[in-house]
Amino acid sequence: MPGLAVAASGSPFKKTRRAEYRYGPVSVEAEEPIAPLIDPSLYDNRALILVPDIYATWPQVGALPRAASYHELTRMLEAYMERSCSRRLPPGLCSRVEYRAVPSAGEAGGWRYTARPGDTLLYSLLHAARIAEAGRLTRVYLLAAEEQHPPHTLAAHTAALLAAALAGAEYVELHQEPQPYPRRGTPLIDTLEAYTLPSESAARILEALAPEEPPEQLLAPRGPAKPPRLRRIREARRLVNTLNHVRRCMLLPLIHEACSGSPASRLAGVLAEAAEAYASASRLAKKRGGGTVAHGLEASAGALHALAAGAALQALAARLVEPSRGEACREEGVPRTVVEKLAKLLGCPGDETPRTCVEERDERLRLRQGCLRTLLAA
C-alpha cells in the first residue's frame, strides 16, 4: 500500500549522532528519523522532506555566491541534499526520498533570508499537491523535525493534511520516544503513532484553517509594485468559491465542480504558477561577504488555506461520485443518496442549494445550467 511520509528537515550540517530508529517491526540505523518508514522490506512509502533554503548558505552546497537567481539557488540546494543523502540514510533508501527547498527567514554566513510564513506554505503545499496528483496514496505520515523552524513545521503539517485529503488517504501523526537509558552502543528511538484521521477529517481540518473571508490576492507585492497577473486566477477563484458554497451547505455546486477534472491537478497548477511568479520576483542582492535573498512578492497564508480547503472538499466529493464523473456526472446528475452522504460527511443538515437551481430526474439531482454563475453573484 503506497504511502507518503512528510517531514520538515533539520540542518543537514549539524553533527548528529546516528541512532537506531524503529517503526513497527522495522528498525534502521540512520541520522534521518524517517528511515524506517521508507524501508522497502515492509513498507511501500516515499518521503517528502522540506528543506529551508537558508541551508544553501553552507559552502558544501556551492550555491552562494555562485547562484545567479533564486531558481538556481533552490535547485543547487536540492541537488546537494540528494548527493549527500547516503550520509544520513542507508543508500538503498535514498531513491525513495524527495528533497524540496522551501523559503525561509533568518541569517547565516552573512546572508539574510527574508521569506515570510505564507511563502513557506506556498512551496510546501505545491510539493504535496504534485505528489497527490501523481499517484494514489493510502497513508500520509507527518514526522516533525527536531530543529526549531516553526513556519516549516506548521507548513509540513498543512502539506501532509492536504496530501491525505486530496488522495483519500489516512492521515497519521507520529512522535518519537527514545528508549530508556542506559543502553550500550547506538541509541534506540521508537517512532509511534500519536493519532490517525480519515481523509474526510483532514479535509474538514483544512476547511477550519481557512479564514472566513479569504484574501482576494494570492500574491501581494512587498513594495509599491502592482500584484502579478496570474493566468490561472479563474481556477483559483473556483476553488475558493467551492469553500464558500460548502460553508453555506450548497452541495450541488460542490459536486458540479468535483465532476470537472482532478482537484489535485487544478490546485497544483495554480500553486505552480504562483511559485514561478514568486521565484521570478526574487533576487540575490550580493555584497562583499554575504548579501540578501530578497523576495519581491509575499504569498498570503489565508488565501493558500482557502485554496487548499477548496481542493480538498472537491476531492472528497469526487470520490463519492467517482462512478459517474465527467460529463455524465454534470449532465445527468448524481443519485440523491450521494448528496445525502456528502451532507453527513460535511456536517450539513442537507443540501441548501436554492430549489430554483436544482433539477431532479429519476432520483438524480443536478445543478441547472447557468446557476453556478448566479450563485457566485449571490
Image (cartoon, rainbow, N blue to C red):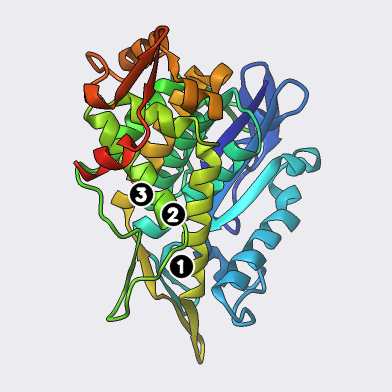
Going 46% across and 41% down the picture, which residue do you hit? 159
Residue at the spot 67% in from the left edge and 74% down from the top edge: 62
On screen, residue 60 above or below 209: below
Q: CA distance from mark 2 to mark 1?
A: 10 Å
Q: Position of residue 318 (x, y in %)?
A: 49, 25
Q: Residue at x 58, y 34 (%)?
A: 5
Q: Is residue 363 positioned above or below 63 on the image?
A: above
Please tell me the numbered disc located at residue 122.
2
Tell me which label, 3 or 2, sits earlier in the chain. Answer: 2
In terms of sequence position, does the residue under pointer 2 or pointer 1 come before the other?
A: 2
Q: Amino acid at mark 2?
A: Leu
Mark 3 vs mark 2, foreground winner is 3
Query: Which comes before the other along the chain, label 3 or label 1?
Result: 3
- Mark 1, Cα crowd under 10 Å, few <14 / some 14-19 / many 20+, is many
Instruction: Answer with left or right where residue 342 lies relative to residue 36.
Output: left
- Residue linked to disc 1: 278
Please give the count of numbered marks on the rendered protein. Answer: 3
Q: Which mark is residue 237?
A: 3
Secondary element at image label 3: helix
Residues at marks 2 and 1 touching, judged by CB atoms closer than 8 Å: yes
Left or right of 335? Residue 6 is right
User: Toward which corner of the image does residue 242 lie, by quadrant?
Assistant: top left
- Element class at badge 1: helix
On the question of residue 195 being in view, the answer is: no
Horizontally, residue 89 falls left or right of residue 302, namely right
Amino acid type, mark 3: Arg
Give the image location of residue 370, x and y in percent: 34, 38
Furthest toward the bottom, the residue is: 288
Q: Nearer the viewer, residue 336 or 172?
A: 336
